[in-house]
Image (cartoon, grey):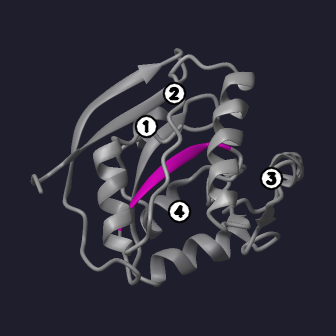
Amino acid sequence: MHGVRVSLLDRQAKALGLPLVKVPIPQAANNEQYESKMREVLTREYANRVTAVAFGDIFLEDIRRYREEKLSQVGMKAIFPIWSRDTRELAVGFIDAGFRAILTCVDSKQLDGSLVGRTFDHSLLRDLPLGVDPSGENGEFHTFVYGGPDFNQLIPIRKGAIVIRENRFYYCDLLPDTEE
């Protein structure tokens, strides 16, 4: 849903000093195919002593139950470190802490598509219409974080083309600004 290039995902993990485990899922995969690929990778990681997975979900109970159920099937636990926190406080705290992010996907059924490609900052929060979650928890928007206090370097990016998929989702293609 974020529509971010794999090369930027790789750079993000490197800048955070974290290992990255990718789950290759075909673009037109149905839910059964998605769950099969996830189960395969989670089973492998469990064998490598990974016993828990952390999620940034905040209040969607159905998503939480789904994640807990699927992880329990492979012997893992789900961790929700920001569960039930106030989403406005989380968004403001994220910005105030110095994290840098950009909106990569906007659901035009919930938010004006012209906001795709916009920086996630205090100005954006002020411009969000009433009813739009400031953390995008209802799927209104998705972001790519390219810098912040936990990053060993800022990930240089530039905005590419904006495309519409499914007559609904606006995506801003982010391009690496320099080659590694």
The x, y position of residue 160, in whole percent, is: 22, 37
Residue type indicated by callout 4: Leu
Disc 1, disc 2: CB below 8 Å?
yes
Q: Which mark is residue 125?
A: 4
The structure residue drawn at horizontal position 41% and vertical position 74%, both measured from the top left corner, is: 99
Q: Using the rendered view, name the quadrant where residue 162 is placed.
A: top left
Q: Earlier in the sequence, mark 3 or mark 4?
A: 3
Q: How many angstroms separate mark 4 from mark 2 (CA)? A: 20 Å
Disc 3, disc 1: CB below 8 Å?
no
The structure residue drawn at horizontal position 75% and vertical position 63%, both measured from the top left corner, is: 58
The correct choice, above or below, for 38 with respect to 48 in the image is: above
Q: Earlier in the sequence, mark 1 or mark 2?
A: 1
Which secondary structure lies at badge 3? helix
Q: Which mark is residue 71?
A: 3
Q: Earlier in the sequence, mark 1 or mark 4?
A: 1
* Residue hosting label 1: 3
Q: How many angstroms separate mark 1 from mark 2 (CA)? A: 10 Å
The x, y position of residue 46, in whole percent, is: 69, 59
Q: Is residue 123 left or right of residue 55?
A: left
Residue type indicated by callout 1: Gly
Q: Earlier in the sequence, mark 3 or mark 1?
A: 1
Q: Earlier in the sequence, mark 3 or mark 2?
A: 3
Q: Which mark is residue 169?
A: 2
Q: Residues within 10 Å of mark 1 (few under 14, many from 20)?
A: some
Which secondary structure lies at badge 1? loop
Give, as a single range, the part of the protein colored magenta. 139-146
Question: Is residue 99 magenta-colored?
Answer: no
Q: Using the rendered view, name the quadrant where residue 144 is placed.
A: bottom left
